[in-house]
Amino acid sequence: MVRLTTKTSMLLLTLTMLLTACYYDNEEYLYSATPCDNTFTFTSRIAPLVAQQCASGCHEGANPSASLSLTTYDEIKAIVDNGGFAGSLDGSNGYSIMPKGTSGLSTCDKTAVNAWITAGAPNN
């Protein structure tokens, strides 16, 4: 039987701890309720996202934030056409990142919105 010295035992223990501590998973990728794919429609992906992240509590009702209502396709398409929707995703062109007070949408949501915009923002 091989006897390990205290130094060798400590070294092995340290290496084991370091190797197991380096494990990392992207929580958004692992536990996302909506898979990050670009096969979707306005009705199935974009409208619910805008309703939850933009309209709810801010861009809806009688006095929407910044006088910008985002509850219908036509309202959303107008802000897409003037560049404001894409600008609010990444804070470009002088727009603030939205939703306000956050670091923005998830990478998956941004990918979906950008794919939809690139496809011409169809009302499908």
Image (spheres, grey):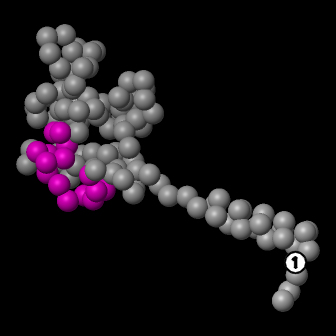
Numbered marks: total = 1
Q: Residue at x 17, y 39 (%)?
A: 48
Q: Residue at x 17, y 20 (%)?
A: 60
> Which residue position is annotated with label 1?
4
The magenta-colored residue range is 34-48
Depth check: give the residue in front, 32 or 62. 32
Kind of residue sitting beneath label 1: Leu
Q: Mark 1: which secondary structure?
A: loop
Q: Using the rendered image of the protein, determine whether residue 53 is visible from the camera's viewpoint.
A: yes
Q: Is residue 106 left or right of residue 14?
A: left
* Residue sitting at the far top: 63
Instruction: Provide residue 89's location: percent of width, then percent of height.
Output: 37, 37
Q: Residue at x 34, y 45 (%)?
A: 110
Q: Is residue 37 magenta?
A: yes
* Residue sitting at the far front: 1
Q: Is residue 79 magenta?
A: no
Instruction: Provide residue 64's location: percent of width, then percent of height.
Output: 21, 15
